[in-house]
Image: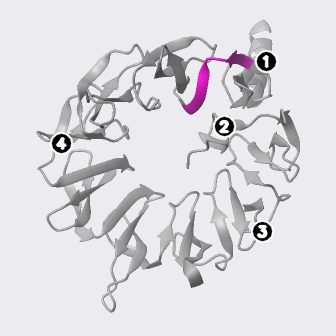
Amino acid sequence: MKLIRTTIFILLLLANLDLFSQLLQVPCVAYRVGREWHIADGMGNILYKSNVMLDVETYSEDLLSGYAFEGDNVVSIYYNNFGEVELKTHSQIAYGFKNNRAFVVENKSDDPRKSDLLFGIVNKRGQYITPMKWLDILEYSEGLAYVMNFEERGYIDTNGNFVFKLDSGFAGYGFSEGLSAISDSRIDRFGYLDTLGNLVIGYDFFEGGVFSDGLARVFIPSKDDGRGGFGFINKRGNLVINNFFDETRVFKEGYNFVAIHGENIVTKWSIIDKDGVSKTDFRFDDCKDFSESVAAVKDLDDTMWYYIDTNFVRISDKYKYCGSFKNGKAFVVDADDRKYFINKEGKILFELPINADIIFDCRTNEKYGRYRRQ
């Protein structure tokens, strides 16, 4: 009987994700008031504060990264979920961790007026997985990271060893759904590799995006005027949605926002499904991808955001800012500059101080405020 009661109690905790997150000290949001950062859980309770951190960069793998002064220098600093400093680096960017690895970038020039940036990789103990020798590097995706310098380039594993190398003139990108775009500068075209380095889709495109929901955006010029546009290919490299669009996002939950340029290069967004069928007209000025069957959009000639569902109808009030939904909640800012988290019914779950000038959603890595990075 005791075991049954214990099991029921655990299941009830798991059913309430916010309460479970609170018990585990999982940050939901970080916000700055004055010069002090407050880090709160999914119920708005303060987990810890920091008057050392200057700004927040990212939250990943249970570490909140940002910037702090160390003497006269700015360093990258990483807090664990209990507010303890887990790691400091001299990196100019506080990269987030993926696969327990983070990039560091430093200016190796003796002249502070000149830039000679080199990249390396560290683990969570600050130990270097690779030395500071790369001129370019892309974050880990599916356990692989693209690196390059003048001597060598290709994809390395989480131990810093090459899985496969690329010849000079080739550049790799991030893996998604087992494939990565690759460009050949000799012919200025893009194709796709698998995780073993095999070319599985030929160099037929002027630009190649990541795969999502089985489709990737590619740019194909028009045979008539050379202008062309973006369309979508499947994993066999077949064009399944024609290249009609000036801009696109990626497919999420079966839908994608696509855009055309109107008069005065005004970008107008619409929604299509995976068959390329239009679900709305080109009526949006801005948009965010679908998440948990909800997307934030802004109409043309309107400064306010609102949410739509997969029936493509408005389901919320209008806001100055709408964050993405995750775990049933989203961060919003209303017309009176009140800042709070809501559920999908629009109910306020908890409110942030009105004088919080920067808000960082730890769940989505979206930032609202004076120093927001796009």
Q: Residue at x 70, y 39 (%)?
A: 327
The residue lying toward the viewer, choosing from 172 and 263, is 263
> Residue 6 at what x, y percent from top left?
76, 12
Q: Element type at marker 3?
A: loop
* Disc number lying in front (1 or 2): 2
Residue matched to label 3: 313
Is 25 positioned to the left or the right of 123 in the image? right
Q: How far separated are the C-alphas under marks 2 and 3?
A: 26 Å
Q: Earlier in the sequence, mark 4 or mark 3?
A: 4
* Disc number lying in front (4 or 1): 4
Is 50 positioned to the left or the right of 230 in the image? right
Q: Tell me the quarter of the picture where residue 329 sits.
A: top right
Is 156 positioned to the left or the right of 52 in the image? left
Residue matched to label 2: 361
**Which amino acid type is marked by label 2?**
Asp
Q: Which residues are magenta?
A: 47-58
Q: Earlier in the sequence, mark 1 or mark 2?
A: 1
> Residue 362 at what x, y percent from top left?
63, 33
Is residue 178 visible in this depiction of the protein?
no
Residue matched to label 1: 9
Residue matched to label 4: 153
Residue that extends furthest to the top in the rendered view of this protein: 2
The residue lying toward the viewer, choosing from 158 and 115, is 115
Q: How far separated are the C-alphas under marks 1 and 3?
A: 39 Å
> Residue 178 at what x, y percent from top left?
34, 49
**Which amino acid type is marked by label 3?**
Val
Q: How far separated are the C-alphas under marks 1 and 2?
A: 29 Å
Q: Element type at marker 4?
A: strand
